Amino acid sequence: MSPAADPSCLFCKIIEGKIPSSKVYEDDDMLVFHDIHPWAPVHFLMVPKVHLASMAQVGPEHEALLGRMMSLAPKLALQEGCRPYPEGGFRVVINTGQEGGQEVQHLHVHVIGGPRPWLKG
Ligand code: 5GP
Ligand code: ZN
């Protein structure tokens, strides 16, 4: 396990390959995989490889990483089956903290889309 990982963290285990996932994209800084309980025809999670508990822990040192994640999201959304803007599109969600509805305490960006109706949202 890398020093940046938290041994008790589900997404760190997925990043390290200890728990399987359905991979969409990977590079040195992030892993993208399908959500196990999709809300919609397209639903994947973009996860930084460094263990950051949530958006609340983000600082200036993470700006480049988050910027790259945001600029990659539209490309991966199209690749995964979202129709182009404006008829298609997608939703980006980052749940943060208990009142923000966060269940897994490792920062992740939900990208959700595809033809409606959706299960949620
Ligand atoms: P949160 O509520 O923290 O924003 O979202 C956590 C997401 O992680 C949920 O949508 C849930 O379905 C997904 N999830 C939880 N456990 C697993 C897992 O083991 N594998 C995958 N691929 N997704 C998971
Ligand atoms: Zn983690």
Image: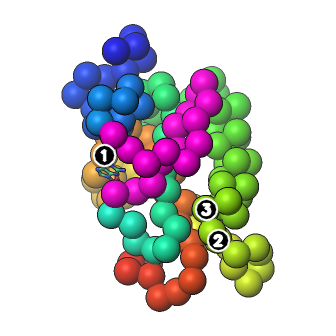
Do the residues under discs 3 and 1 have CB atoms within 8 angstroms?
no
Label 3 crowd bin: few (<14), some (14–19), many (20+), radius 10 Å = some
Extreme-left residue of the structure: 8
Do the residues under discs 3 and 2 have CB atoms within 8 angstroms?
yes
Label 2 crowd bin: few (<14), some (14–19), many (20+), radius 10 Å = many
Q: CA distance from mark 1 to mark 2?
A: 25 Å
Judge by depth and name the residue closer to the eye, 91 or 63: 91
Q: Quadrant of residue 16?
A: top left
Residue identified by numbered label 2: 82
Look at 66% across and 54% down and name the residue there: 76
- The amino acid type of the residue labelled 2 equals Cys
Look at 59% across and 42% down and name the residue there: 25
SS at mark 2 in the image: loop
Extreme-top residue of the structure: 3
- The amino acid type of the residue labelled 3 equals Glu
User: Given this view, does label 1 or label 2 mark the residue nearer the observer?
Assistant: 2
Residue identified by numbered label 1: 104
- Rendered location of residue 32, percent (x, y): 52, 44
Viewed as shown, does residue 63 lie left or right of 40? Answer: right
Residue 79 covered by magenta stretch: no
